[in-house]
Image (tube, coloured by chain):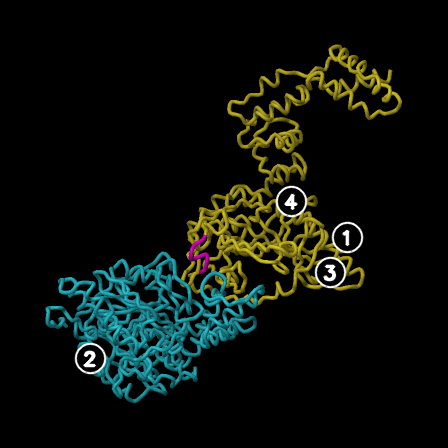
Amino acid sequence: MAPQTAAGDVAVIDTLRLTAEDAAGLLERGEVSGEELAGAYLDAIEARDPELHAYLRVVGERSDGVPIAHKDVITTKGIPTTAGSRILVGYTPVFDSTVAARCKEAGLPILGKTNLDELAMGSSTENSAFGPTRNPWDPERVPGGSSGGSAAAVAGGLAPWALGTDTGGSVKQPASLCGVVGLRPTYGTVSRYGIVAFASSLDQVGPLTKTVRDNARLYEIIAGQDPCDSTTVELPEPVAIPEGEDLTGVRIGVPKEMNEAEGIDPGVSASVNAAIRLAEELGADVEETSLPRSVDYGLACYYLVAPAEASSNLARYDGVRYGHRAAVDGDLTALYARTRWEGFGAEPKRRILLGTYALSAGYYDAYYGQAQKVRTVIAREHAAAFERFDVLVSPTSPTVAFRIGEKAENPLAMYLSDLLTIPANMAGLPGLSIPCGLSDGLPVGLQLIGPQFSENALFRVGHALERALGFDFVPERLR
Amino acid sequence: MNGWEPVIGLEIHVQLKTRTKMFCRCENVWGEEPNTRTCPVCLAHPGTLPVPNKTAIEWTVKLGLALDCEIAERALFHRKNYFYPDLPKGYQISQYDVPLCSEGRFVVPGPDGDREIGIVRAHLEEDAAKTIHVGGAAGRIHGAEYSLVDFNRGGTPLVEIVAKPDVRSGEEARRFLQLLRQTVIELDISDAEMEKGSLRCDANVSVRKAGEEGYRTKTELKNMNSFKFVADGIAVEVERQIARYQAGEEVMQQTLHFDPQTGTIAPLRSKEEAHDYRYFPEPDLVAVAPPADMVERARAEIGELPAARIRRLEAEVDLDLAYGLVTSGRDALYARVPGDDRRAVANVLMNQLAAAGVDPAAVDGAELGRLVAARETIPRQTFLDALGASADPDFTADPYLAETTVSDAAALDPVIDGILAANPGQVEAYRGGKEGLLGFFVGQVMKETQGKADARVVNERLREKLNA
């Protein structure tokens, strides 16, 4: 969309509608300056963020690039990074995360740091120590989580694009609930260096954008091997920005357990099924398939592995070197206990307890050890499916955005929000969520899963469907 | 030992002298200003990740090969979780069930032949930071007024070697450790200095009746930071355990702290040792697969091991001298020094040459051989002067050999007579029975002749004259 021109010839930039690609075009052609572009987003933030609370901190950098918002687990040199937790209040990083550095090198100024569930633990952004973020489609509802601030910022026109992190579905699920595009990349393609760790074997940084093409562009900036993260690898092929609009020859599998699972809203199923039919019309070969064990055991397995790793990753927050320190004098154990009691909210505490238990002597084999074996089973089950299919599809989230407070007191109901995103994550596979329609006036997300390093295929299928679906990503109430 | 047999299992930590730390690029250096060799990684800032030091892995493989270990095809790093201020991440990256090196053995020559000590494992880990507890007792946290942490040491590479409980005495433990230290130094992977903490030893000690199967309760001895303390600490603990059993008491499983100043052992507070480390595979790292060419390169860099050299030397000198030569790194020079009296060569190397403080590697063996052969015919001081100069470039024994000892009685008699005449009191006392004064007269004669007199002849002549 070209900017509308108002009286006095000042370009008015419609941040709700402008894609990052459009914004880059405006800058390249000199139609707006970087200053004006960032200014437009800062104006939008000033206007709408008091309601949405997508940002924890507005930074307001300005340069000649398309500005970006970073989830506040992404370490930014000289800019406080809280991970949505009181435990990190007062901490200002002395280094840049690799993804922040790559965005900086690509010339993207930072608009701000976005809200999230504390330490990326949650599916609604209600677990933030600094208050919830609201869904731009309906401020009474959650934006999803844990990257809810980034998803809401993009959907609400408060950022052209943003980075989030995804452990069990924390990019894909909020993308789905906010009607934007979210990629969880193949484990190992994007550096985790400088990402406040939740569960190391699952954490991945991913882009949240208005379009699939924007998503591919941002992925291209952040992906690739990093000498600071020894679990990263070189991409087997360069990122291809998708162009084609047909799906001829693409083999799409529809795992029945993931499309017929208990708890999937009928309206969600209807939108997803319509999108699958559309894929067929575009030339794809669609066939039903099965991932029985992945769905049956994925969630349980995840809630052993992720808390176990979290219990260890969060041990460094002890009040000794940075962040919150309780006012305790003289007793080391009391200093640790008090600092962590005051600094962590309910969900991190719950997961530290779960994880510590799962790793304890006498329980390791039955819990963490067993979960790792199940993880291998899930990976094999997916690998077998990808011998027959290029892409697997399902709803991203079983429901559309739920009301703030609706699941806050029921952790299990909240955990089920990630039922469909977790299996592929456990297998280290990439997943793309694109909006595929509305149910009760709220966005529905379609999840596309591919084998390792199949991001280009996901972008291709996602782009073709996005074009055919013609989903309007501007929230109805803001149009 | 009255029929009791000590059973000793050693755990040794060797700090590797790599240029950088184990998982970050901070300089690995000892003795610098506290907290000046740190970065976000070794201070465990949020989001930081470990990157393994390849040299440390190669050196661990090299040490493993020297210990005759099997090298894992895919070794794993694990997290060992516990809270302590010297452990900024709240866990130590170590190895657990798949270490780099396992199932080895280390030969320790002893008075009763070779003893083979089994090696359970040798694994790579990061060292903790250094805590300094101020106030309170013996530098321990309990009762301390406050504690300081120096993160310079935090994250430096450390190899832990666990030996099977095959050692049978404190002395054997000392020999094991001396040989291991020499091995590590020759591999050029560590300073291995116990007083600096770059070589540390803990011992699991139990005793049993000779011929008894199985093991009794063991105690863990910590903080023995010299070879002597290792031998002494183990000996004290073995005695204590035997005494308890003989008194009809049991030995409690506990960790003991050896106090070298008093030579006593005291238990650590139980709170300091009760840990469930919750080991699990380090998800921030991938498996370590030492490439075949790296293993072969490491193998090729291992020379003849100290134990084998001791065994060879033992035939020429004796066990103690052989240990001395090898563990002081003097056996190479020993081999270069010609001479029929091998014990004499060894003794000169271990005593006078060592005292002269010269670098053995710089000494010309042939010239030193000439000096050793002439050691009784040239004046003692000349001999010592020659040793002191023996590492100088262009050193030759010739000028020193030219100075001969005065052993001609005709030449010495006037000097001796003069000394006796000048000390009538001492002469009187000697003749009255104080024969120890002979040394005084010898000393006076040597002084007068500037050390050139033949001590044997001087002794003879003095006795003859005094007893006349």
Q: Chain of mark 3?
A: B
Q: Amino acid at mark 3?
A: Glu
Q: Amino acid at mark 2?
A: Asp
Q: Which chain is yellow?
A: B
Mark 1–mark 2 contact, CB under 8 Å? no
Q: Nearer the viewer, residue A318 or B280?
A: A318
Q: Is residue A253 above or below residue B276?
A: below
Q: Which chain is cyan?
A: A
How far apart are the two marked residues, 3 and 1, measured between alpha carbons? Answer: 14 Å
Question: Label 4 crowding class (10 Å Cα cut-off): few <14, some 14-19, many 20+?
Answer: many
Q: Which residue is mark 4?
A: B109
Q: In the figure, residue B47 lies in which quadrant?
A: bottom left
Question: Label 1 crowding class (10 Å Cα cut-off): few <14, some 14-19, many 20+?
Answer: few
Q: Which residue is mark 3?
A: B212
* Both labels 4 and 3 in a single chain: yes
Q: Which residue is mark 1?
A: B1
Q: Amino acid at mark 1?
A: Met
Segment tinted magenta in the rendering = B38-44
